[in-house]
Image: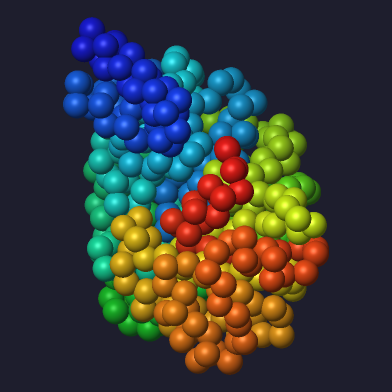
Amino acid sequence: MPLRAKVATSVSRTAAALSRAAGRGDGSVIGGWIGLKIDPDLLKNLAAGRAIALVSGTNGKTTTTRFTAAALGVLGPVATNSFGANMPTGHTSALAKAGATPFAVLEVDEHYLARVIDETTPRVVALLNLSRDQLDRAKEVAMMAQMWRTALAAHPDVHVVANADDPMVVWAAVNTAHVVWFSAGQRWHDDSFVCPECGSPIERADGDWRCTGCPLRRPQAQWTVEDDGVIDPRGDWHLVKLQLPGHVNLGNAATALAVAAEFGVRPIEAVPRLAGVASVAGRYAQVERDGRNIRLLLAKNPASWLEAFDMAEVAPTLLSINARDPDGFDTSWLYDVDFSPLRGRQVLITGDRAYDLAVRLEVNDVAFRHVHTFDEAVRASPPGRLEVIANYTAFQDIRAELDRVN
């Protein structure tokens, strides 16, 4: 690397280490921010010489990135932004911290995908899904799909692994020269009722979909989830045993296998490594406290809340909602979530915007109790499982109370 890049890398590592030592976080943002101030081309310099995979989408990025890094580990050391810092500062910090590795797997915020493709020249880009998220400051779903489509058109040599079940993703990737499709089923349809190509209604039946006004339709998937396993392009079925709950994580695992295959990793080699992933930046972590087995689930938008309800056991459940800057200030999205699956169980609510959540639960006829602190929630629940579902900063607050260190 150029001398400036070497100096910037060293300073980035030091700043990140000091941040961790001071208890101000894992340093994955401040290290990259300082490094890029010294050398604006630092991410490009750090990416040079590595075979890189990028993972982007509204939901599932962090988990799929962790699965993919585990699968690629078959081939050698892998750099990755495992704490979920998914903007260029986080990518820069992750690569600087890792040193020289032949491979990197980076989670990328969907808004930054075009820039990160430009700066890292990835071998593979995985596109997971697109749905509404933080609409008070983020782009509409169709606008995001257009950004992805434009970015991929500018890089025709990039191999794409894309979700065949999401019409927005298909439209963004369909004209790509090298595309592999995966299918895990899609439960959330509310952001893709209308074709992004022509505006006509999209018709769905038996897991298939097609536009009623133009040729856009669901492509044939090469990788599919079936029962408790994944079928590869050769038609071979692989049993996938995971520590992480829910059907959605089986889909994330299928995506990781498809990405790893683009690097030459066979599923039979990668599948055992996926079972080693037990917690992802605190998500799905299980903590014993005062006779309660507390499991932490992150849900930050309507689609992810739908999946969280699928993962959660029928047990006492704590819901926590904040509306700080990382969460988005607008909580109207709560009315896009169907909370009826919580009926009949003990429901506790807390967080900065607990009253907003209370009104929403009243509308859905879900009985609840408001608690002011996490400790009060633990005391209010009986011994046994306590499911905790929280959006981003509320999740981090609870992790801090539990002294979770990833």
Quarter of the rendering occupied by the N terminus:
top left
Snapshot colouring: rainbow
The answer, for residue 133, to whether it is visible in the render is: no
Query: Which residue corresponds to the image point at 62% horizontal and 66% vertical from the top-left?
Result: 376
Query: Which residue corresponds to the image point at 42% horizontal and 72% vertical from the top-left?
Result: 353
The answer, for residue 118, to whether it is visible in the render is: yes
On screen, residue 335 above or below 294:
below
On screen, residue 342 above or below 246:
below
On screen, residue 363 above or below 294:
below
Quarter holding residue 386: bottom right
Horizontal and vertical percent position of residue 404: 60, 43
Query: Which residue corresponds to the image point at 58% horizontal and 20% vertical from the top-left?
Result: 76
Question: Does residue 268 appear left or right of residue 179 in this picture?
Answer: right
On screen, residue 89 above or below 37:
below
Query: Which residue corresponds to the image point at 35% horizontal and 55% vertical from the top-left?
Result: 326
Nearer to us in this view, 113 or 224: 113
Figure disc tally: 0
Q: Residue furthest top?
A: 3
Quarter holding residue 7: top left
Quarter holding residue 31: top left
Quarter of the rendering occupied by the C terminus:
top right
Horizontal and vertical percent position of residue 130: 41, 62
Horizontal and vertical percent position of residue 276: 71, 37
Horizontal and vertical percent position of residue 143: 26, 64
Nearer to us in this view, 317 or 127: 317
Question: Does residue 131 appear left or right of residue 257 in this picture?
Answer: left
